Amino acid sequence: MKMNQSEIHPCPSCGHTYQGDHDFCPHCTVPISHQSKTQPMGQIYSEGFMIREATKNPRKLIVLLGMWCLHLPGLLIGGWITLSSLFHLFTDSNFWGPGMTFTDVVLVTVALMMLGGLALFSFVSIYRTTKNYYRLQAEKANPQSHHEKTND
């Protein structure tokens, strides 16, 4: 069912109004139509919104645990391979053998940067989600102190 271009609709997430038929809210980018989740690029944007929202506002313990399950393998595997490779790089004199070409050095460097980036991204996601979960729990337990902090 297509919406009329002249109709004004409120976003279910942020409340801002938009006109016409959009797949995503123009203000907060939340998916607002069924089609936003079925198109290939729309599905990517919807999943990105879901992960951003889970990182910023993890209201339930299951969301926190899910983010840990999603990112912990990347942290452990990426971190372990990067650190063990760097250890061998600086301690093993045969690591940079005479047969290594410039291309091999570039490939090793790029692989280490990618795995290190994966580990860093996973760590930051876990840290932010955990920090925001405990912040939200503290605000829920003591809403008065949060209100005083925001007014200062």
Image (spheres, grey):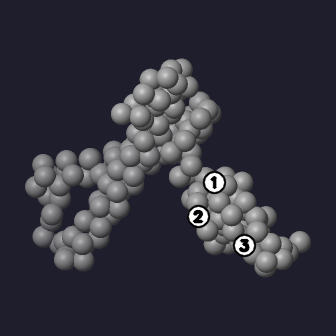
Residue at image location 56% in from the left, 45% down from the top: 54
Name the residue beneath numbered marker 2: 27
* 107 to 116, vertically: above or below: below
Please indicate whether residue 67 sits to the left or right of residue 62 in the image.
left
Please indicate whether residue 151 sits to the left or right of residue 13 in the image.
left
* 103 to 119, vertically: above or below: below
Pick the front one: 8 or 52: 8
Pick the front one: 66 or 108: 66
Asked which secondary structure carries label 1, the reply is loop
Name the residue beneath numbered marker 1: 14
What amino acid is found at the position of numbered circle 1 in the picture?
Cys
Asked which secondary structure carries label 2, the reply is loop
Name the residue beneath numbered marker 3: 19
Q: Earlier in the sequence, mark 3 or mark 1?
A: 1
Which quadrant does the N terminus fall into? bottom right
How far apart marks 2 and 1 lie (CA) works out to 8 Å
Q: Are marks 3 and 1 in contact (CB under 8 Å)?
A: no
What amino acid is found at the position of numbered circle 3 in the picture?
Gln
In this view of the protein, can residue 73 be seen by the observer? Answer: no
Which quadrant does the C terminus fall into? top left
Residue at image location 47% in from the left, 37% down from the top: 132
Outermost residue to the right: 1
Q: Residues within 10 Å of mark 3 (few under 14, many from 20)?
A: some
Q: Are marks 2 and 1 in contact (CB under 8 Å)?
A: yes
Q: Earlier in the sequence, mark 2 or mark 1?
A: 1
Residue at image location 56% in from the left, 38% down from the top: 58
In this view of the protein, can residue 68 be seen by the observer? Answer: yes
